[in-house]
Amino acid sequence: MANNYIVTYDLDSPRPTHAEMDKHLEALGPSSLRGRVLETVWFVKFPGTEIQLRNYIAQILDREDLLLVVKTDRSAWTKLLVDDAQFKTAFEA
């Protein structure tokens, strides 16, 4: 069963670019639902652990870049970049 994660990062080096990070997250494949919810914050529904997700994302990062992966089962929001209905259904059982 997939878990819900919030992924946020600061890219403090020339590479990866935001476009490269987008492609890297999109490459998680069809078993993962993902969407950018804020500028550098993604929602990811991923079948592995937070450590596995962190390790996958960290492959593309430079040593100056920052990354936080948080497992979550609840959320509240006002307005997101991703379709609110799609995001809401990710938290339904």
Image (tube, helix red, strand yellow):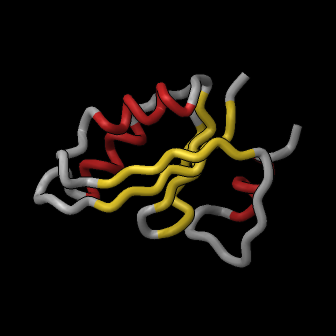
Image height of 37 relative to 5, above or below: below
Q: How many marks?
A: 0
Where is residue 18? Give x, y as percent. Answer: 28, 59
Image height of 54 relative to 41, above or below: above
Name the outermost residue toward the right: 93
Where is residue 49? Give x, y as percent. Answer: 58, 26
Q: Image point 71% across, 53% down: which residue?
A: 86
Please identify the quadrant where the C terminus is shown: top right
Q: Image point 11% across, 59% down: which residue?
A: 14
Q: Image point 59% across, 31% down: which residue?
A: 46
State the residue in front, 8 or 45: 8
Name the outermost residue toward the left: 14
Q: Is residue 84 left or right of residue 93?
A: left
Where is residue 75? Give x, y as percent. Answer: 76, 59
Where is residue 72? Give x, y as percent. Answer: 70, 46
Q: Quadrant of residue 84?
A: bottom right
Image height of 51 relative to 22, above or below: above
Please identify the quadrant where the N terminus is shown: top right
Q: Is residue 76 left or right of residue 81?
A: right
Image height of 71 relative to 1, above or below: below
Q: Quadrant of residue 9?
A: bottom left
Name the outermost residue toward the bottom: 78
